[in-house]
Amino acid sequence: MAARRLIPLLDRVLVERVQAATRTAGGVLLPESALPKVNEGVVVAVGPGRRNKDGDLIPVSVKEGDKVLLPEYGGSLIKLDQKEMFLYRDDDLLGILKD
């Protein structure tokens, strides 16, 4: 089965959340209830941007592969090829994480 690719429209950004670590540095397995909520993700795809009142294109502020800081709530859950991804507007993203 060929992998489907979603191309977001307008200023939307498709993000795959980073999974929380299930082991400590010492190798202890953490139960699911003790895992911290992770609010960062990796940008998978971006739309072309939106247009202002004059019709000029305002590009999206992130690009594919960027690590971003996500809001605690929001985004639309989408399942693609057995993976859970979230669709956000560019304005909803809180920032870009640099290494």
Image (tube, helix red, strand yellow):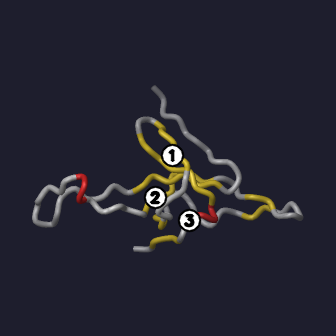
Q: Is residue 85 left or right of residue 52?
A: left
- Element on which disc 3 rests: loop
Q: Which residue is mark 1?
A: 77
* Outermost residue, top side: 1
- Residue drawn at x 59%, y 63% as measured from the top left: 92
Marks 2 and 1, Cα distance to the nearest angstrom?
A: 15 Å
* Outermost residue, right side: 54
45 relative to 55, above or below: above
Q: Is residue 95 left or right of residue 10?
A: left
User: What x and y, as percent, mark residue 1?
Assistant: 45, 25
Marks 3 and 1, Cα distance to the nearest angstrom?
A: 15 Å
Q: Which residue is mark 2?
A: 42
Crowd around label 2: few <14 · some 14–19 · many ≥20 (10 Å): many
Pointers 2 and 3 in contact (C-beta within 8 Å): no
Crowd around label 1: few <14 · some 14–19 · many ≥20 (10 Å): few
Q: Which residue is mark 3?
A: 93
- Residue drawn at x 49%, y 64% as measured from the top left: 70
